[in-house]
Image (cartoon, helix red, strand yellow):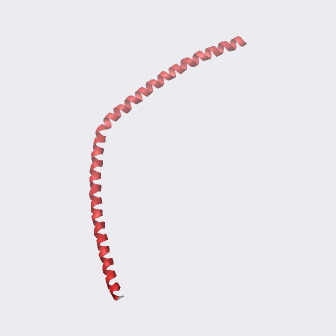
Amino acid sequence: MDFWLSFLPIVIYFLLIIILVIGIIIGIKMIMTLNKVEEVVEDVNKKVQTLNGFFHIIDYTTDKISLATDRVVESITGLINKIIRKKRIKKRKRMI
């Protein structure tokens, strides 16, 4: 029994030291990985910033095209509504 009381604490301390060393190694590797990820994110951010002008031009042209098509659709629907109103007015005059 005395053997176990003296041997088990030594084994437990040894295992705790191993777990601590493994934790430190994993922590260092995680920090290195996060630094690499940060570099990649910064690189991607720089590349996206260079494309902002291009995206601004595309956004501007799509807005203008949308505005032009909206005006065309409004004018066509206005003409159709005028034609339909004239037909309705003529039918009402005939009924009276």
Asked whether 8 or 13 is in front, the reply is 8
Relative height, residue 82 to residue 7 (above, below): above
Q: Is residue 4 left or right of residue 68?
A: left
Q: How many marks?
A: 0
Most extreme residue toward the top, as rendered? 94
Residue at the image point whose x is 29% and y is 63% from the top: 26
Q: Toward which corner of the image does residue 57 lie, by quadrant?
A: top left
Viewport quadrant of the N terminus? bottom left
Asked whether 88 or 41 is in front, the reply is 41
Q: Toward which corner of the image does residue 48 lie, by quadrant?
A: top left
Asked whether 84 or 20 is in front, the reply is 20
Q: Picture coordinates of residue 51 (x, y %)?
A: 30, 37
Relative height, residue 89 to residue 35 (above, below): above
Relative height, residue 88 to residue 31 (above, below): above
Most extreme residue toward the bottom, as rendered? 2
Q: Picture coordinates of residue 11 (x, y %)?
A: 31, 78
Viewport quadrant of the C terminus? top right
Relative height, residue 81 to residue 1 (above, below): above
Q: Is residue 16 left or right of residue 73?
A: left
Q: Picture coordinates of residue 89 (x, y %)?
A: 65, 15
Q: Is residue 57 left or right of residue 70?
A: left
Residue at the image point whose x is 31% and y is 35% from the top: 53
Residue at the image point whose x is 32% and y is 38% from the top: 52
Q: Picture coordinates of residue 81 (x, y %)?
A: 58, 19
Residue at the image point whose x is 58% and y is 15% from the top: 83
Asked whether 45 or 30 is in front, the reply is 30
